[in-house]
């Protein structure tokens, strides 16, 4: 149906104006970027390995008064949304999440009502500048607005666990069709040129920021507006330099994630994961909530990051398996280097979640790579002092220490 819509002829003038040429929109798959998969290192900025991303970027400076209408079918995934960014600053301007999307007439929203057939249900999203006349804006549903001072506008679509739930990276449906329109007249216009998105130009993290100076793994909240943030998601991170024969181990009490749509409204989070990325801001290893279901007797999970090429790896894995709620994530130091950014991601919808990462003061962007912070302020930025057991905290141990009979899991969550 979407292909039929987009292959049709759209007229940017009155029917009686025969001197204005018709135009044909590109097919949806040609309007958007190629799939940027988190699991194949085709997107930077520490993406989630279990998410797929697409972007469309256009020059609002060259196309003033132009809004976008997206028409599509609901994909089958754990989570999906659209986010509008200032592509020059990478700050988010507005967003709409799956459960908040009003379906078209005759459809239901499968993220709020259980159904097996997501794709038969359709939606329309309207992306408009703030200067859009109020009367026209009032006629639109599912509105995402951006300041009319922007020069470059980026639209991102994200799908989490689409491959796992639908068997296909798009969630079993076509990409949404994009139709440009003039917000002053309401008339459809030609598709603006797809410009290069700055997601391709994210800088590397200096290797000097990954140091042996501190063995404790202190998690802090990532800067709020940095590198195309996903508005429902919050992030805690720590930097690790993983030497040979060393293990990075941390523990925390994870939130409750849903197992079915009927639990979306009551679960503490929609999704959580641990991702490991390198200094080049690419993600290489990850694990998410369903892959880490067990907890120890105190409700904790323990994450062990081990060198994939270690001669002791099998022994480390064997001991970990004997301790309920302990999971080993491997890191290929030979291929990826010894600098690791461990990112703990929570997708939170409820403002009332008792252990929300939003209680942790985010570190300023200019300090995220390192620097001096006042101690009283630092304690507001550290996950464990603020969130208690729900805040991850860890330590670096030698493999011999972990494999010894005297190893005590209680020593993992220490700050020095």
Image (cartoon, rainbow, N blue to C red):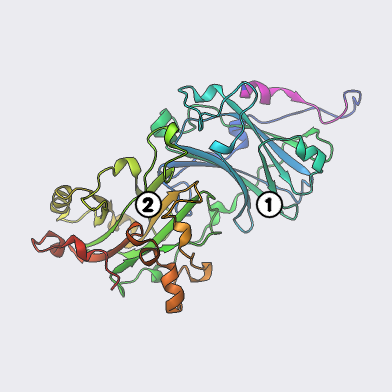
In percent of width and height, residue 126 lies at 69, 38
> N-terminal of the two: label 2 or label 1?
1
Q: Is residue 230 visible?
A: yes
In percent of width and height, residue 127 lies at 69, 41
* Discs 2/1, front: 2
User: In which quadrant is the N terminus drawn?
Assistant: top right
Q: Mark 1: which secondary structure?
A: strand
Bin the neighbour count of mark 1 within 10 Å (Cα to Cα): few under 14, some 14-19, many 20 and up.
many
| Residue 238, quarter of the rendered image | bottom left
Closer-to-camera residue (118/331): 118
Closer-to-camera residue (394/336): 394
Q: Which mark is residue 215?
A: none
User: In which quadrant is the C terminus drawn?
Assistant: bottom left
User: Going 90% across and 28% down the picture, which residue do you hit?
Assistant: 19
Asked if residue 73 is positioned above or below residue 59 in the image, the reply reads above
- Residue sitting at the far left: 405
407 on left or right of 217: left
Closer-to-camera residue (370/105): 105
In percent of width and height, residue 96 lies at 59, 42
Asked if residue 335 is positioned above or below residue 141 in the image, the reply reads below
Q: Which residues are magenta?
A: 2-14
37 in the magenta segment? no
Bin the neighbour count of mark 2 within 10 Å (Cα to Cα): few under 14, some 14-19, many 20 and up.
many
| Residue 16, quarter of the rendered image | top right
Q: Mark 2: which secondary structure?
A: strand
Residue pointed to by mark 1:
152
Q: Are the residues flagged by discs 2 and 1 in contact, CB closer than 8 Å?
A: no
Q: Is residue 243 visible?
A: no
Q: Which mark is residue 275?
A: 2
61 on left or right of 289: right
User: Going 65% across and 23% down the picture, which residue do you hit?
Assistant: 105
In percent of width and height, residue 232 lies at 51, 48
């Amino acid at each position: 149906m979407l292909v039929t819509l987009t292959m049709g002829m759209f007229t940017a003038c009155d029917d009686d104006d025969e001197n204005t040429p018709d135009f044909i929109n590109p097919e949806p798959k040609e309007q958007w970027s190629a799939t940027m998969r988190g699991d194949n290192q085709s997107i930077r900025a520490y993406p989630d390995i279990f998410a797929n991303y697409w972007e469309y970027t256009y020059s609002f400076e060259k196309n003033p008064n132009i809004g976008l209408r997206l028409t599509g079918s609901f994909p089958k995934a754990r989570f999906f949304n659209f986010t509008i960014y200032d592509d020059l600053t990478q700050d988010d301007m507005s967003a709409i999440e799956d459960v908040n999307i009003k379906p078209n007439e005759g459809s239901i929203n499968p993220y709020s009502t259980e159904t097996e057939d997501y794709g038969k249900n359709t939606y329309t999203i309207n992306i408009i500048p703030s200067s859009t006349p109020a009367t026209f804006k009032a006629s639109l549903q599912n509105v995402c607005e951006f300041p009319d001072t922007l020069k470059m506008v980026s639209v991102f679509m994200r799908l989490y666990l689409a491959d796992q739930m639908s068997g296909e990276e798009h969630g079993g449906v076509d990409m949404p069709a994009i139709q440009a329109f003039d917000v002053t007249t309401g008339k459809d216009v030609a598709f603006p040129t797809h410009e290069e998105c700055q997601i391709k130009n994210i800088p590397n993290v200096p290797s000097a920021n990954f140091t042996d100076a501190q063995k404790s793994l202190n998690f802090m909240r990532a800067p709020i507006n940095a590198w195309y943030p996903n508005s429902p998601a919050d992030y805690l991170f720590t930097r690790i330099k993983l030497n040979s024969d060393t293990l990075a181990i941390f523990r925390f009490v994870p939130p409750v994630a849903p197992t079915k749509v009927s639990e979306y409204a009551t679960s503490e989070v929609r999704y959580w994961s641990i991702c490991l990325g390198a200094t080049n801001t690419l993600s290489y290893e990850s694990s998410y909530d369903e892959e880490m279901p067990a907890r120890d007797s105190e409700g904790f999970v323990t994450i062990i990051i081990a060198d994939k090429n270690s001669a002791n790896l099998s022994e480390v894995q064997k001991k970990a398996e004997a301790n309920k709620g302990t999971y080993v994530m491997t890191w290929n130091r030979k291929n990826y280097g010894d600098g690791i950014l461990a990112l703990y991601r929570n997708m939170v919808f409820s403002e009332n979640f008792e252990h929300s990462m939003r209680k942790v003061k985010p570190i300023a962007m200019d300090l995220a790579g390192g620097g001096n912070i006042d101690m009283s302020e630092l304690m507001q930025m550290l996950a464990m002092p603020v969130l208690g057991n729900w805040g991850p905290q860890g330590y670096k141990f030698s493999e011999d220490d972990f494999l010894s009979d005297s190893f005590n899991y209680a020593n993992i969550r220490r700050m020095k």
